[in-house]
Image: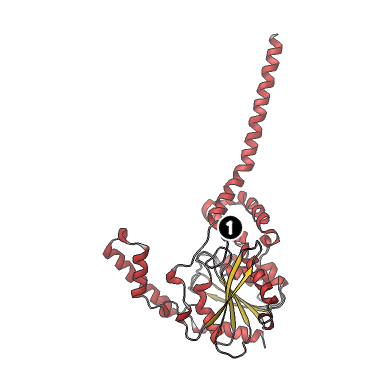
């Protein structure tokens, strides 16, 4: 009897240990996935709206006109875009503008659209999924930018009027990654300008993750990779290096060495190493223009510093605890000359224009 009880007790103990082992293994497998999903959702599971101080209005630009276009992206979400143009002359070509991440849609690049429209091009600019006027509960993730641009280009190819024009792309940051990555799918693209773009979604996740978690990010990267493959399919693994190698378009790449958002060694330097001797590519490296102001003038940057200094004094005078978004916006409206604040760098923009003109000769 004692032996029987001991066997039963041992059996129960083994069952309990077995269940505990399964739970531990499950926790080790499931917990990291849950953590990664949570982190991903925190970064990409929200919408973005352009802040009013940075969003331009078409009334600011003399003679600039626009026509609304709405197309559907991969999950049926409606994407809102506009074709910007000036005058009645036949446009030289169509430039598709892809905006950056985190500040909302394309309206903060309206001065870029105005510049190219003033120099004979039509510009097609749109808000990516989850941004400003476009549908989507969130931006979903960085590969969504490539998907939306792919659908925008397919929409353009199906439009009788737009499809007749030579096609070029212009992208900043997220838009630069999107423009270069999508190029292998669209041989009709004749020229691409990438400003402070990055190579791949996973490169950016790893870069930010390493700053926050050190080498521990190496254990999470396979999970991030699987998550993006589930969400975006083949678009998840698209990257600039591979796409530009297979593309036929001419490419002009800008970056600044002091970019604290996208390190130059993880993007521009990689492209330069691979394509520096390729006649399709032109590289322009700056030393002190940061991430957001590569195409803004030196006078603009000086004026921004003055505005920031004046605003700091204003905050000190009323007490930081009393500052509200409404008060900040009122200060900007009363004290900021928007044309000076956003002034484009004429030399850089002329270089971009010459590049596009050469693409269509």
Report the quarter where the N terminus lies.
top right
The answer to whether 54 appears left or right of 269 in the picture is left
Q: Residue furthest left?
A: 317
Q: Residue furthest top?
A: 1
Measuring from the top left, give residue 246's x and y in whole percent. Answer: 73, 71
Q: Secondary structure at mark 1?
A: helix
Q: Quadrant of residue 84?
A: bottom right
Report the quarter where the C terminus lies.
bottom right
Q: Is residue 142 above or below residue 248?
A: above
Q: Please give the residue where the numbered disc 1 appears in the rendered image.
A: 205
The residue lying at 36 percent from left, 72 percent from top is: 332
Residue 141 visible in this rendered orientation of the protein: yes
Q: Quadrant of residue 117?
A: bottom right
Q: Is residue 236 above or below residue 179?
A: above
Closer-to-camera residue (227/136): 136
Closer-to-camera residue (114/183): 114
Residue 281 visible in this rendered orientation of the protein: no
The residue lying at 51 percent from left, 77 percent from top is: 110
The residue lying at 56 percent from left, 87 percent from top is: 119
The answer to whether 15 appears left or right of 55 in the picture is right
Closer-to-camera residue (35/274): 35
Badge 1: few (under 14), some or many (20 or more) residues near its Cα, within 10 Å?
Answer: some
The residue lying at 51 percent from left, 68 percent from top is: 259
Q: Is residue 50 above or below residue 163?
A: above
Measuring from the top left, give residue 278's x and y in whole percent. Answer: 69, 77
Disc tally is 1
**Which colouring convention does the figure follow?**
secondary structure
Measuring from the top left, give residue 239's x and y in whole percent. Answer: 66, 65
Measuring from the top left, give residue 27's x and y in whole percent. Answer: 61, 39
């Amino acid at each position: 009897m004692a032996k029987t009880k001991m066997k039963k007790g041992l059996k129960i103990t083994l069952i309990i240990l077995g269940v505990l082992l399964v739970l531990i293994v499950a926790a080790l497998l499931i917990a990291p996935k849950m953590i990664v999903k949570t982190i991903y959702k925190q970064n990409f599971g929200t919408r973005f709206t352009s802040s009013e101080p940075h969003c331009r209005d078409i009334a600011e630009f003399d003679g600039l006109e626009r026509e609304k276009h709405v197309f559907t992206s991969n999950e049926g979400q409606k994407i809102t875009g506009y074709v910007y143009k000036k005058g009645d002359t036949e446009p030289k070509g169509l430039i598709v503008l892809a905006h950056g991440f985190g500040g909302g849609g394309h309206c903060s690049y309206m001065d870029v659209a105005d510049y190219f429209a003033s120099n004979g091009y039509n510009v097609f600019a749109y808000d990516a999924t989850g941004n400003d006027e476009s549908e989507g509960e969130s931006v979903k993730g960085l590969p969504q930018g490539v998907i939306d641009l792919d659908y925008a280009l397919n929409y353009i190819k199906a439009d009788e009027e737009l499809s007749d024009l030579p096609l070029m792309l212009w992208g900043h940051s997220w838009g630069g990654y999107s423009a270069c990555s999508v190029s292998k799918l669209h041989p009709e693209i004749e020229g691409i300008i990438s400003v402070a773009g990055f190579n791949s979604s996973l490169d950016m996740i790893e870069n930010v993750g390493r700053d926050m978690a050190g080498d521990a990010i190496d254990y999470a990267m396979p999970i991030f990779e699987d998550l993006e493959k589930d969400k975006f399919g083949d678009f998840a693994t698209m990257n600039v290096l591979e796409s530009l190698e297979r593309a036929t378009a001419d490419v002009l790449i800008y970056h600044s060495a002091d970019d604290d958002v996208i390190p130059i060694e993880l993007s521009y330097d990689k492209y330069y190493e691979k394509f520096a001797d390729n006649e399709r590519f032109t590289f322009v490296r700056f030393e002190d223009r940061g991430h957001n102001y590569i195409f803004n003038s030196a006078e603009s940057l000086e004026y921004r510093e003055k505005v920031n200094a004046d605003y700091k004094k204003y905050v000190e005078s009323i007490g930081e605890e009393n500052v509200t978004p409404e008060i900040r916006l009122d200060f900007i409206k009363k004290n900021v000359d928007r044309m000076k604040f956003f002034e484009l760098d004429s030399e850089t923009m002329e270089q971009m224009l010459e590049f596009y003109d050469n693409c269509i000769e």
